[in-house]
Amino acid sequence: MGTQTIQEGSQASSGGDIVTLTELYAELGLSSPTANEVTVCTQAITKAEGAIKAFLKYDPVMRSRTEFYPQQDVTRNSRQAIWESTSTEAYQRRRSEAATDELQLQHLPIRGNPALQVYVDYDARSGARSGAFSASTLKTEGEDYWPNYDGADTDGYSICRDGILRSIGSWPTIAGAVKVVYTAGYSSNEFRGGDANVDASPIWDATMAEAFRRAKKAFTQAKKSWGWAAGPLIGERAGDYSYSISAQQARELMGMSLSISEESQWLLQNFVNYGYAFSGG
């Protein structure tokens, strides 16, 4: 993983963050794509990756993230109080303001390298207040909190596939009181099944399938303009040239919605961040 940790969002080959144009050309059998075909394939990848991210509830590409939690204020009136302390001060808070031991992050998986930065500031207002999340509010991993690590990549760095941060004390329930700077997602190598410990190839497979379907749909619609057909050819005549393709398969391609196929959903089911979707952040 090494130095690529933060840079995985930029592809060496043009195309998307998960699937490249070269890979889609090969899947479609395009050896020398025209300008129109390049445009169609680029748009197909963009739309496919957008649909995949929407289904997963997060962006699976490895990037550095800065986020504020919780997203909703779930504070409830309560007379119960607890004492919390640092090395220099002690303070009392309503139990309802610090009532959860788990913090669900949006992007998966959390990577142990580089190290997370977690700040807790009850009056930070999602960083909008002057002086919010100062150095004194920085928490220590392993002492104040720890990611729910469940494995390591082949470089030996820990990963947390469920995106949960656990707290020795408890996390605030006041919206925007926690700032987390972390790296999450999968590398290009992991998308292509190149890491024995972290296999994200089903995400690549689903993205390719969705890009392929969208490209073929566009080519079917554009057949009369620049001569590319989707679906099996079932009739052709010389002379005054004419052609026909499978009407059933063409209708299926033309009728595709923005959602992903059942096969793609099956491939992605183990990667969806259901915890974030149901927790509301």
Image: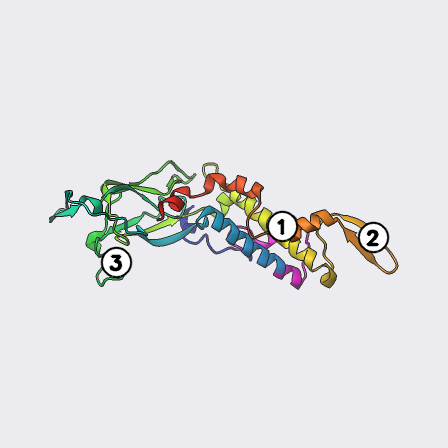
**In screen coordinates, is 137 left or right of 155?**
left
Which segment is the magenta one?
A: 16-39
Tell me which colouring the rendered structure shows: rainbow
For numbered disc 2, what is the local secondary structure? strand
Check if residue 17 falls in the magenta segment: yes
Which residue bears the numbered disc 3? 125
- Dot 2: within a 10 Å radius of its alpha carbon, few (fewer than 14), some, or many (20 or more) residues? few
Q: Which residue is mark 2?
A: 236
For the residues labelled 2 and 3, the Cα–Cα distance comes to 67 Å
Report the number of discs: 3
Quadrant location of the N terminus?
top left
Question: Going from the N terminus, do you reach mark 2 or mark 3 first?
Answer: 3
Give coordinates of residue 37: x percent, y percent.
Answer: 66, 59
Q: Position of residue 159 (x, y in %)?
A: 38, 41
Marks 2 and 1, how far apart at CA: 24 Å
Q: Secondary structure at mark 1?
A: helix
Q: Amino acid at mark 2?
A: Glu
In the rendered structure, the answer to whether residue 255 lies left or right of residue 278 reads right
- Crowding at mark 3 (Cα within 10 Å: few <14, some 14-19, many 20+): some
Which amino acid does the dot numbered 3 rest on? Answer: Arg
Q: Which residue is mark 1?
A: 213
